Image (tube, grey):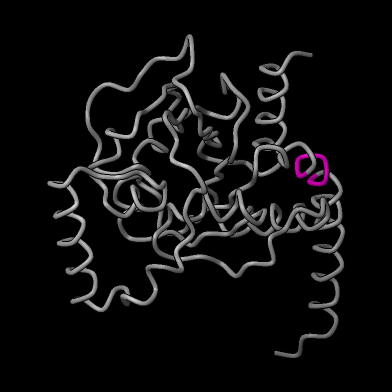
């Protein structure tokens, strides 16, 4: 089995178990633009907007300037902005500070990539043209529960609490620590169309197979425990 078939089979296996409505998104950070992958043309308001395009089935790569429209996303991806765009960053942060959305002292604590990528590849997991560094699952809480339990069973949990804004910090956080649960943020929900009942679970690419394998045990265990809990509820609940 070649690498492409492997990612395709993994996506099918995970999607079938979790009944995912959206395709998992593979993201790869590269030092050089990849061969035989289409470069993104056009504009998007944020780096996480590219997640939406990949979940819809597109395979492409971006370069740093494609991320200039989102000051926060550029920060988490360690992308330097031009002097003109830096002013926009200051304005964006000031607005967030004034709204009480984030405090200035929180900014240095936001996870960032260790190195600026020269290109970033986005694709549905099953169509990944290169091995992903991270894989994003947009899912409901019940599916995130199963992924979290499978990650624990596979020994790849980060031990980090659920992350909030900005959503994009979940990528470097996962690379640094392991599996990450992200509650999302309002910008991401607008730019990606993430549902009110959905959140993200993020895995390192190297951990996806182990988690997929652990999912079988976890889902079987949950099915048995579901019956057990229902039986106890009917027997013991008095209200």
Q: Position of residue 188 (x, y in %)?
A: 35, 52
Q: Position of residue 36 (x, y in %)?
A: 48, 9
Q: Residue at x 22, y 25 (%)?
A: 42
Q: Quadrant of residue 158?
A: bottom right
Residue 97 shown left or right of residue 9 in the figure: left
Figure check: 124 above or below 157: above
Split into 4 quadrants, where in the image is the N terminus? top right
Along the line of sight, which residue is nearer the eye, 31 or 71? 31
Residue 124 shown left or right of residue 219 in the figure: left
Q: Main secondary structure of the magenta part?
A: helix
Figure check: 133 above or below 97: above
Q: What residue span does the magenta drawing correspond to?
A: 211-215
Q: Position of residue 118 (x, y in %)?
A: 42, 30
Split into 4 quadrants, where in the image is the C terminus? bottom right
Q: Residue at x 60, y 32 (%)?
A: 132
Residue 192 shown left or right of residue 98 in the figure: right
Along the line of sight, which residue is nearer the eye, 185 or 47? 47
């Amino acid at each position: 089995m070649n690498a492409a078939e492997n990612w395709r089979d993994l996506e099918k296996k995970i999607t079938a178990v979790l009944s995912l409505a959206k395709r998992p998104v593979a993201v790869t950070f590269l030092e050089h633009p990849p061969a035989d992958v289409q470069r993104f043309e056009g504009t998007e308001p944020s780096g996480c907007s590219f997640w939406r395009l990949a979940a819809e089935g597109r395979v492409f790569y971006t370069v740093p300037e494609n991320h200039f429209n989102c000051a926060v996303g550029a920060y988490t991806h360690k992308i330097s902005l031009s002097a003109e765009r830096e002013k926009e960053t200051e304005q964006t942060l000031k607005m967030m500070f004034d709204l009480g959305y984030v405090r200035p002292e929180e900014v240095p604590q936001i996870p960032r990539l260790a190195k600026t990528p020269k290109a970033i590849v986005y694709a549905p997991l099953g169509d990944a043209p290169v091995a992903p560094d991270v894989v994003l699952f947009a899912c409901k809480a019940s599916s995130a529960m199963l992924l979290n339990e499978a990650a624990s069973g596979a020994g790849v949990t980060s031990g980090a609490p659920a992350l909030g804004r900005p959503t994009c910090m979940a990528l470097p956080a996962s690379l640094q620590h392991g599996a990450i649960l992200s509650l999302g943020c309002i910008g991401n929900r607008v730019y990606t169309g993430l549902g009110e009942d959905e959140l993200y679970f993020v895995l390192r690419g190297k951990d996806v197979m182990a988690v997929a394998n652990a999912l079988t045990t976890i889902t079987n265990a949950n099915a048995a425990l579901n019956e057990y809990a229902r039986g106890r509820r009917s027997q013991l609940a008095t209200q």
